[in-house]
Image (cartoon, rainbow, N blue to C red):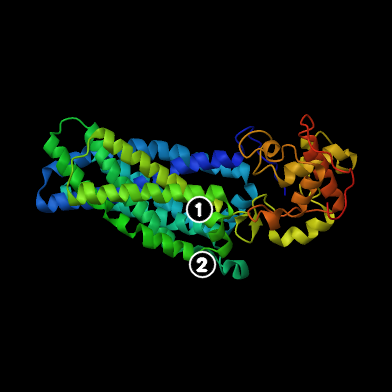
């Protein structure tokens, strides 16, 4: 490890990534879906002479620019900034492995932004069919960005044959690539439909009947929600068995967030079918915003699950969540992790590993092996987790991390490191009335 850890008090670096990423993914999915909606709807409106839809699209694109091009760009930069600080090793792996994929995505992103601005500023200035072509360039470019990013994101959970071949294509078209692309496409169209409802209710100059016509047009884009359940089943069939177990009860947080996502998606789907498609209800501003919030919960929950079921890896079976590569585990068990993470020596106030006291070594080991996922007192704080634990319990937990809690990486290092980390963790709650151990540290705890 050549990089120090970005320590975020109370919140933790991982939670910073999660917050930014969920917001960005929601905006990005909306941008893709909204681009497809605009291209298809403008083409249809030109063919069938529907001036109401063209008038709405002109207002709609303004909102698209403000939301996706401003907030989307800010959160996109925020993701790169946060992942580079929290997990530079994994970020470096993704960049080096998929460098041409990233380059291609950035070309499509440039086309998307350029076409989007031209599309907005040339309303009523270009011949309608030419203007529609620019809309299609924007839509296709935005969707192609999703196509490429999807391959890199799914690679982190299911690298598949890449673990043996290290081939770009094996990593990109991995086992969960296609089901994930279907799920993300459904999310894009649904979010676009909901935003159409919000936008037409916010916009001025429309009668109730005109709003209703636009809402019915947007509601058609929620029909793909019917494929959400089979696509989800397809996706989970492709993930490793251990990852499925985390969702089915081995990690209660993953189970709860999965249920949140399923429930929220189901509620949106039922309302879309019974309210929009079957009965063609009018949806006011408050209801459309509520639907948007439920959709945000669904998207955020499923993204949290997708990230969480990778545990204990950040790249499945290749790199643990604390940035230790599986291939290096044998060497680190012999030599210890401090030689692999020299920055920890400076972080605890030393100048070289040989000068560290046992207490400093314990803190350094905690920083190297635990700090990427745990804070001291905040989110996923280690002190509350081991509150009042006796020494033997801490020792036993460290010796059996990966056995008793599959989603946690195993402890790496020789016996001396295990003892020093045990003592450091014990010292975190010295003020608590902890049960007393016999003071001995044995191989069995």
The answer to whether 37 is drawn above or below residue 232 in the figure is above
Q: Report helix, strand or loop for mark 2.
A: helix
The answer to whether 41 is drawn above or below residue 19 in the figure is below
Residue tagged 1: 306
Q: Nearer the viewer, residue 26 or 47?
A: 26
Q: Quadrant of residue 434?
A: top right
Q: Nearer the viewer, mark 2 or mark 1?
A: 1
Q: Nearer the viewer, residue 73 or 107?
A: 73
Q: Measuring from the top left, give residue 328's x and y in whole percent.
A: 74, 59
Distance from disc 2 to disc 1, alpha carbons, whole Å, reads 21 Å
Residue tagged 2: 169
Q: Measuring from the top left, give residue 2's x and y in whole percent.
A: 72, 47
Label 2 neighbour load within 10 Å: few <14, some 14-19, many 20+: few
Q: Nearer the viewer, residue 301 or 430?
A: 430
Q: Report helix, strand or loop for mark 1.
A: helix
Left or right position of 86 against 340: left
From this viewpoint, which residue is outermost toward the left?
49
Q: Residue at x 50, y 39 (%)?
A: 19
Residue 121 at least partly seen: no
């Amino acid at each position: 490890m050549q990089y120090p850890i970005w320590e975020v008090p109370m919140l933790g670096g991982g939670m910073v990534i999660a917050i930014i990423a969920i917001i960005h993914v929601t905006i990005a999915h909306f941008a893709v879906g909204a681009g497809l909606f605009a291209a298809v709807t403008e083409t249809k409106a030109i063919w069938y002479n529907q001036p109401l839809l063209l008038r709405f699209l002109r207002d709609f694109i303004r909102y698209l620019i403000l939301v996706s091009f401003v907030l989307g760009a800010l959160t996109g930069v925020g993701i790169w900034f946060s992942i580079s600080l929290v997990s530079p090793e994994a970020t470096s792996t993704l960049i080096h492995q998929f460098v041409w994929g990233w380059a291609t995505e950035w070309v499509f992103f440039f086309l998307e932004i350029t076409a989007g601005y031209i599309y907005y500023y040339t309303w009523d200035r270009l011949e309608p069919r030419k203007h529609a072509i620019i809309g299609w360039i924007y839509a296709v470019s935005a969707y192609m960005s999703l196509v490429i990013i999807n391959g890199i994101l799914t690679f982190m959970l299911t690298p598949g044959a890449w673990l043996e071949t290290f081939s770009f294509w094996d990593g990109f078209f991995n086992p969960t690539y296609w089901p994930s692309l279907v799920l993300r496409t459904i999310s894009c169209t649904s979010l676009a439909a909901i935003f159409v409802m919000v936008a037409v209710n916010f916009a001025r100059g429309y009668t109730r009947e005109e709003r209703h016509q636009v809402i019915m047009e947007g509601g058609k884009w929620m029909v793909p929600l019917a494929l959400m359940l089979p696509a989800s089943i397809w996706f989970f069939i492709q993930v490793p068995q251990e990852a499925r177990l985390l969702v089915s009860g081995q990690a209660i947080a993953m189970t709860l967030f999965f249920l949140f996502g399923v429930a929220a998606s189901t509620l949106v789907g039922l309302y879309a079918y019974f309210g929009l498609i079957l009965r063609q209800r009018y949806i006011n501003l408050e209801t459309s915003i509520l639907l948007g919030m439920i959709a945000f919960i669904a998207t955020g929950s499923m993204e949290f699950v997708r990230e969480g079921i990778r545990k204990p890896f950040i790249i499945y079976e290749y790199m643990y969540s604390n940035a230790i590569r599986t291939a290096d585990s044998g060497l680190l068990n012999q030599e210890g992790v401090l030689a692999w993470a020299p920055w920890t020596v400076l972080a605890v106030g030393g100048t070289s590993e040989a000068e560290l006291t046992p207490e400093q070594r314990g803190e350094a080991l905690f920083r190297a092996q635990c700090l990427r996922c745990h804070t001291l007192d905040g989110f996923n704080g280690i002190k509350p987790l081991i509150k009042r634990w006796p020494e033997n319990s801490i020792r036993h937990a460290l010796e059996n991390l990966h056995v008793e809690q599959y989603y946690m990486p195993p402890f790496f290092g020789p016996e001396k490191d295990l003892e020093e980390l045990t003592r450091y963790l014990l010292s975190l709650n010295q003020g608590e009335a902890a049960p007393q151990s016999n003071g001995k540290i044995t191989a069995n705890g």
